[in-house]
Amino acid sequence: MSGSLPALAQESPTQSWIVGWVDFLSSTLPIIFLVLVVLVGTILIVKSKGGLQKAIIFGIGAALVFLVLTNVESIADFFGEELPVVDD
């Protein structure tokens, strides 16, 4: 073997379309999810006469959970630096 990689086939229009949609959705769906969760949660809290304070607390909690879930790798890196694992 010569060590060089074989030439890759050109992407088809369908592959390009799918890759484009996956890229778009991977950046857009988390925002849509956050907005829907906060909106629906707030509406349900207000309907159940939970009050504005509970709705605000729910919104802040949902935003924090969203930030943690979308930054899992960064959080893992942070804890990896703070609490290094020692291999024996």
Image (cartoon, rainbow, N blue to C red):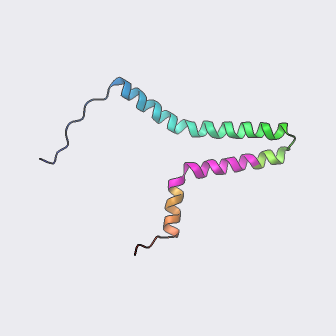
Q: Position of residue 57 (x, y in %)?
A: 77, 50
Q: Residue furthest left?
A: 2
Vertically, is 11 above or below 83?
A: above
Q: Position of residue 23 (x, y in %)?
A: 46, 35
Judged left or right of residue 8, residue 78 is right
Residue 63 drawn in magenta: yes
At horizontal 46% and vertical 70% (from top left) the residue drawn is 85
Q: Position of residue 7 (x, y in %)?
A: 20, 36
Q: Closer to the camera, 26 or 87?
A: 87
At horizontal 49% and vertical 33% (from top left) the residue drawn is 24
Span shown in magenta = 58-73
Judged left or right of residue 51, residue 76 is left
The quarter of the picture where the C terminus appears is bottom left
Vertically, is 45 above or below 65?
A: above
Judged left or right of residue 11, residue 24 is right
Vertically, is 16 above or below 29?
A: above
Q: Residue furthest top?
A: 13
Judged left or right of residue 63, residue 50 is right
Secondary structure that dominates the magenta span = helix
At horizontal 44% and vertical 73% (from top left) the residue drawn is 86
Q: Residue furthest right?
A: 49
Residue 67 drawn in magenta: yes
Tell me how many marks there are. Answer: 0
Q: Position of residue 13 (x, y in %)?
A: 35, 24
Q: Residue furthest front?
A: 88
At horizontal 49% and vertical 61% (from top left) the residue drawn is 77
